[in-house]
């Protein structure tokens, strides 16, 4: 798993650099999700430059669209667009906007921004694959605060009703959102019990441990009686000491001085 850890570390650096250049954006949720994106794009998913324009492949939906910097760094690293584009994040006219736009950015499977919609989109893709006899998975990443949206639970009910075993959802459960802790804003616990009540196959994982994530994804793929959700325990701002578990870093870009400090910490990891 060392290669995945190194890759995730590289991606964290790219997130910090692009956000600093932009002067705005969402570091906390990008850093808490980067390990999940790493294992999906570099180990698990069948998504490549060669098959991207085909339907017979896996799909990935970033429902928590404010974590776009994490997705952009992965897509750039995978060659969907030049890495130099990351320096233009959120700039007027750039295809890398604050939330993903599938029309503007190659590699993005679904536009997202308004929270709560991603699971519904994943269901639609999974149903289309079923009609076309395509045996590929649809992965969707949601934030824990996003579970406060009612549409999530309508979609959860739909996925269970149609036994969409090819839908695998990840919950980035870092416990924080823009206005404070989830419990302060609108309690979402117990996430596993809620999904279980909707007849989902529930799996717990450490969202920053690649062995734990690998086991969880393997378990989800083997379950064929309905959709699976992997509830990932994560840390907002993971990897940067002064950002970790700090709600203030939900939507604030680091200054050049703060970025220098963050990059120095990441440099010392390996």
Image (cartoon, helix red, strand yellow):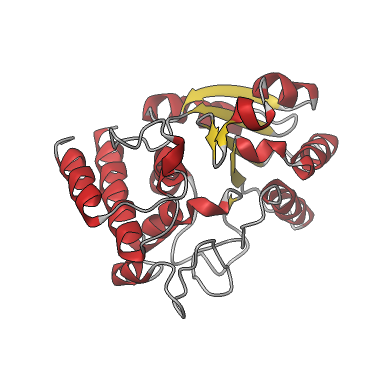
Image spot of residue 125 (x, y percent): 71, 55
Q: Quadrant of residue 181?
A: top right
Image spot of residue 187 (x, y percent): 67, 26
Foreground of the two, 51 or 119:
119
Picture mark count: 0
* Side of 175 where 167 appears, left or right: right
> Does residue 199 appear in the picture of this structure?
yes
Q: Residue at x 65, y 32 (%)?
A: 185
Q: Residue at x 58, y 61 (%)?
A: 109
Quarter of the image containing the C terminus? top left
Q: Residue at x 49, y 47 (%)?
A: 45
* Residue 92 in the image: above or below residue 89: below
> Does residue 59 appear in the picture of this structure?
no
- Residue at the bottom extreme of this rendering: 93
Quarter of the image containing the N terminus? top left
Q: Quadrant of residue 112?
A: bottom right
Q: Residue at x 24, y 50 (%)?
A: 259
Foreground of the two, 208 or 67:
67
Image spot of residue 171 (x, y percent): 58, 34
Image spot of residue 178 (x, y percent): 54, 42
Foreground of the two, 80 or 118:
118
- Residue at the right extreme of this rendering: 161
* Residue 169 in the image: above or below residue 136: above
């Amino acid at each position: 798993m060392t290669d995945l850890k190194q890759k995730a570390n590289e991606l964290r650096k790219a997130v910090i650099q692009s956000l600093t250049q932009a002067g705005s954006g969402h570091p906390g949720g990008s850093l808490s999700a980067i390990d999940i994106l790493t294992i999906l794009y570099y180990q698990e998913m069948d998504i490549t430059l060669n098959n991207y324009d085909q339907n017979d492949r896996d799909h990935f939906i970033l429902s928590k669209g404010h974590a776009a910097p994490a997705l952009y760094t992965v897509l750039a690293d995978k060659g969907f667009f030049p890495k130099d584009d990351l320096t233009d994040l959120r700039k007027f006219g750039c295809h890398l906007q604050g939330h993903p736009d599938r029309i503007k950015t190659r590699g993005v499977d679904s536009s997202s921004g308004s929270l709560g919609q991603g699971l519904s989109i994943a269901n639609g893709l999974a149903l289309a694959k079923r009609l076309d006899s395509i045996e590929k998975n649809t992965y969707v990443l949601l934030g824990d605060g996003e579970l406060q949206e009612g549409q999530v639970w309508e979609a959860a009910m739909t996925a269970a009703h149609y036994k969409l075993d090819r839908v695998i959802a990840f919950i980035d459960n870092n416990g924080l959102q823009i206005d404070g802790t989830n419990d302060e804003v609108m309690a979402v616990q117990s996430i596993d019990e809620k999904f279980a009540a909707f007849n989902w196959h529930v799996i717990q994982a450490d969202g920053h441990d690649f062995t734990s994530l690998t086991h969880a994804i393997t378990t989800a793929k083997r379950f064929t009686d309905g959709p699976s959700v992997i509830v990932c325990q994560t840390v907002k701002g993971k990897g940067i000491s002064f950002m970790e578990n700090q709600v203030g870093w939900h939507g604030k870009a680091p200054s050049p001085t703060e970025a220098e400090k963050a990059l120095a910490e990441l440099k010392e990891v390996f």
